[in-house]
Amino acid sequence: MPGAKISRGPDGRLFLQHGPIDLIVEMFGPAAEVAQAQVQAGRFFNGLLDELVQELALLRRPIGAAYPMFRGAVARAMARAVWPHAEDFITPMAAVAGAVADGVLAASVLGRDLEKGYVNNGGDLAFFLAPGATLDAGVVADLAHGGLSGRVHLEHAMAARGIATSGWRGRSHSRGIADAVTVLAATAAQADAAATMIANRVDMDYPGIERAPANSLDPDSDLGDLAVTVAVAPLPHGVRRAALLSGVDHARGLLGRGLIQGAMLTLGDQVATVGSVAGGVLEGASRQDQSEGI
């Protein structure tokens, strides 16, 4: 596999790419500090994929009764993020995108005097905010068509430092039928794992929902022969509502355990929100049945 590619765009953003990892890094602050932060990001990123590959076999294994021990810092962060969900089927790979974003962000800002910054790993974001800084992040409610359908306003005083989205039409396979589940959490890795698990719970057995073994779609899938969603026909209102409520119940449980700060769940023309961040939740999505927990 070719080595890591590091480049800078005309707008000053840093682009880091290696194999399946494709990051956008943007920092704000004094020019010299931003430049050094980019150097640190590149230095951390170089070799990161190789480090993960060395432990890939164990990273793809379901979490069991024993806490998994890893050597690499990002692999250890993945394990920490998924461990609270060990009562269900989950592997550390459920947190890989968020953990990579967290790791690159931490390396970027270490020792630097910056106002704010973020690392975007395919829509999963880790962000840094100095006191008084704010950041607006877009929310995608339909992974099939993209486009921003809402936003979340982030402030330094908030506990959230990570955002992640999961759904059956996203980059990774899902066992549920959610169009998208976006989660705010203390880290991007935690948000990534929680979004995966909530999206899995947005589900129903109903004609027109097609599934296939994950390993029939990707022989290397960490989900093995578990059934994942491959198609969802138009569903009656009541079915959509019941599926979404199942996800809402799970999200409320994670909120009560302090594992997330907020979540937005979408399915068809329905949206549900759980939790709040500084007096407001993930805002702006336009759906017929938008409500707090439906």
Image (cartoon, rainbow, N blue to C red):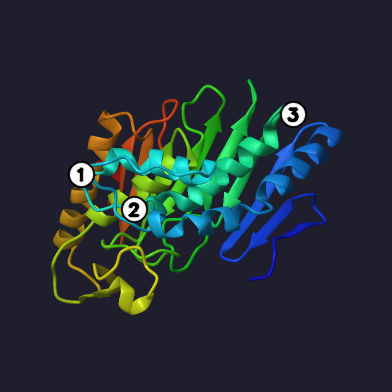
Marks 1 and 2, how far apart at CA: 11 Å
Q: Amino acid at mark 3?
A: Arg
**Above or below 108: residue 1:** below
Please report the residue visible at 65 percent of the width from the left and 25 percent of the height from the top: 130
Counting from the top left corner in percent of width and height, residue 91 is at 34, 53
* Rendered-image quadrant of the C terminus: top left
**Element type where label 1 sits in the image:** loop
**Element type where label 2 sits in the image:** loop
Q: Which callout, 3 or 1, points at the residue further toward the start of the chain?
A: 1
Please report the residue visible at 27 percent of the width from the left and 43 percent of the height from the top: 85
Counting from the top left corner in percent of width and height, residue 254 is at 28, 36
Is disc 3 surrounded by few (<14), some (14 to 19) or many (20+) residues within 10 Å? some
Q: Residue 6: which disc?
A: none
Residue annotated with mark 2? 91
Q: Where on the picture, by quarter, is residue 33?
A: top right
Counting from the top left corner in percent of width and height, residue 287 is at 35, 54
Please report the residue visible at 69 percent of the width from the left and 53 percent of the height from the top: 46
